[in-house]
Image (cartoon, helix red, strand yellow):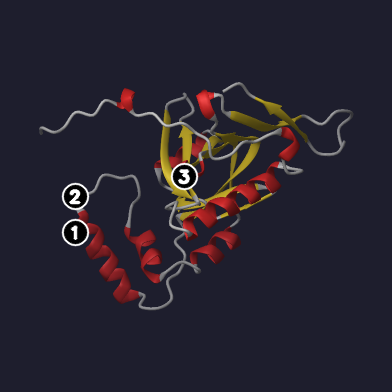
Amino acid sequence: MGGVSVDPREQRRTYRASHLSESELAPSWLDQFRAWFADASAAVAEGRLAEANAMVFATATPDGVPSARTVLLKGYDARGFVLFTNLGSTKALEAAANPRASLVFPWFTLERQVVVAGTVTPVDRAESEAYFHSRPHGSQLGAWASPQSRVITGREMLERRRDALGARWPATVPAPPFWGGLRVAPVSVEFWQGRPDRLHDRLRWRVVPAAGQPGAAGPEWIVERLAP
């Protein structure tokens, strides 16, 4: 297919929207994320950003072959960041076999991104089922209809399965046993703010092991500035 050739080297933008200094940081990575997520959500309400909770979720096989995809954040607290998926999907199988992952929140309109690295654990069944039953009916049916990440013969197969399931469950849909949540517990959380001349602000919370004897207080976090 032909088309206009666009040179990405000519696409440049100067970032001037804001800045990030150590003196302005919230007391914890969680408080800082909460503040930035509120800003991103406000940008969505104003029509300046498509989705505040869209994030890239990167996993890898045990021998280090990576894969990444955009998913939706469905919860966060001091324990980490939660997403839900088919547990037979590529991302879920990789996370089970190699429970290390990275997240990226690309808030382009705000000239910001948040980069998370951490470990992956399953969300408990009760929490997964509670979220499943909060989803729209069509999304519930879709979770049953789609053998996520597997090769299929065509879209028509998915639609037939969805319609058959809709006839079977016109109201209440049970949570699939193969569907659930994953939680990324962070060991580092980097807040990136675009600045002029590519001298961006990068401030990272990083966990360090607790000092002292076994049984000491939990891990502590330090803040580091990274060169852009």
Location of the C terminus by quadrant is top right
Query: Rounded to the nearest whole Å, what is the CA distance between mark 2 and mark 3?
Result: 38 Å
How crowded is the residue under tag 2: few (<14 C-alpha within 10 Å), some, or many (20+)? Answer: few
Which mark's residue is nearer the viewer, 3 or 1? 3
* Number of other residues with Cα within 10 Å of mark 1, as a class: few under 14, some 14 to 19, many 20 or more: few
Q: Residue at x 78, y 35 (%)?
A: 219
- Location of mark 2 (residue): 153
Report if the CB atoms under discs 2 and 1 are less than 8 Å apart: yes
The answer to whether residue 15 is left or right of residue 215 is left
Looking at marks 3 and 1 on the same chain, the residue that comes earlier in the sequence is marked by 3
Image quadrant of residue 6? top left
For label 3, count other residues whose C-alpha is less than 10 Å away and answer few (under 14), some (14-19) or many (20+): few
| Residue at mark 1 | 156
Circle 3 residue: 109
Which-is-in-front pick, marks 2 and 3?
Answer: 3
SS assignment at label 2? loop
CA gap, disc 3 and disc 1: 37 Å
* Amino acid bearing label 2: Thr
On the image, which quarter does residue 66 sit in? Answer: top left
Q: CA distance from mark 2 to mark 1?
A: 8 Å
The answer to which of 52 and 162 lies nearer the viewer is 52
Q: Is residue 172 above or below residue 97?
A: below
Residue 47 % position (x, y): 43, 57
Q: Earlier in the sequence, mark 2 or mark 3?
A: 3
Q: Amino acid at mark 3?
A: Thr
